[in-house]
Image (cartoon, rainbow, N blue to C red):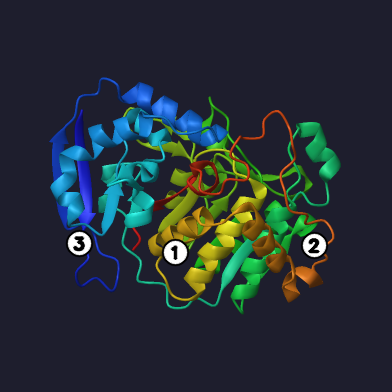
Amino acid sequence: MVAHLYTRTIIGFSVPKLPRALHVATIPQRGIERAVDQLATRCERGLPLDDSANALAELLLAPFATAIEHAHHLIFVPYGTLHRTALHVLPWRGRPLAEQFLITLLPSASLLQFLVPAPALDLPRRAFVVGDPAAMAYAELAERQLPQLPGAGVEATYIAGLFPDSTVLLGSAATAEAVRRQIGGYPLVHFATHGFVVADAPLSAAVLLANGESLSAYDLMGMRLAADLVVLSACRTAEGRVTGGDEVIGLTRGLLAAGAQAVIVALWPVDDHSACLLMSALYRSLAAGESPARALQLAQNYLRSLSAETAEVAFQRLTDTPVAAASGLRRGARFGTLDTADTPLAVHNYSHPYHWAPYMLVGISG
């Protein structure tokens, strides 16, 4: 396997720029797939990490040691099975990459020639936010065996409250028609909802909206967005089919094709409450003028620092905002994850990648 690592140095970049250096190394493919499968399984299920992360780091990072030592921002272009890997979890000098570097992914190297780096977000005042659109149809969710998302409603109302000129669609208001009509003119777009993927039909991957409606990758490809950043705070939104050209076809590709400069998507099912905490921290940084890559890094490290007790306190503070109170969300927004057979072992350990690492930034963004 021939591996490529793009880097940006730390010196003199006040606005996002294209990569300044391309580093190439030949890496033995043997052992990579097994290590990827082990790491992905342990991250998704909240299991203790084994040597798979160290093994992958030795294979993928060690050949670029000199370049990484002098880098500030790493851009990964995954190949094959690496598309399902949380590369930012890999250890570097004993700590996760995400703790030390800005991390961006590209679904394929060919996109470098088409994506134009957006200028740094100028303290944006406008966001388009969709939150828990199934809030008024929990009976239907039960039929589909999908959990309720009280944290998604808190997340959406909190984010909308950070930006003075936001539009927020909650519950039954988040119809497909309302989303299509209003989404096009906003620099920030956020979905806090359920997502689903169809293994054999990647363009059918979608986020769920109100009244049993959805917005699919195919739908997105026919739209025009002016967004610097689109965030899909929903399960498995990073998944798709890897094509012969090693490009992932799915929601990410649909958003980039629609004009989004960068997207944040999730590699595995996300916890409702940890997603709310991470996304609230992400948007606080964006509202303060941080770049998407830096905002995601800060949010991930913030979540990693929380204990079960401080996480609960932080969540309750989010429900006490005026916007959340006015939306009537506080009554149903209880903290904690249901104790089921599928609950990860790391459910209250926010330093585990299960909580902070599903999210990755895809696109050209500082």
Q: Residue at x 55, y 46 (%)?
A: 355
Spatial CA span between label 2 and label 1: 26 Å
Label 2 sits on a secondary structure element that is: loop
Q: Residue type at mark 1: give it.
A: Ala
Image spot of residue 76 (x, y percent): 30, 45
Residue bearing mark 3: 9
Looking at the rendered structure, which numbered label has been put on residue 326? none
Spatial CA span between label 3 and label 2: 44 Å
Q: Nearer the viewer, residue 79 or 201?
A: 79
Q: Is residue 313 visible?
A: yes
Residue bearing mark 2: 329
Residue bearing mark 1: 295
Name above or below for residue 291 compared with residue 307: below
Image spot of residue 126 (x, y percent): 56, 74
Spatial CA span between label 3 and label 1: 18 Å
Label 1 sits on a secondary structure element that is: helix
Image spot of residue 138 (x, y percent): 83, 44
Q: Residue at x 19, y 69 (%)?
A: 11
Sequence-wise, which precedes: disc 3 or disc 1?
Answer: 3
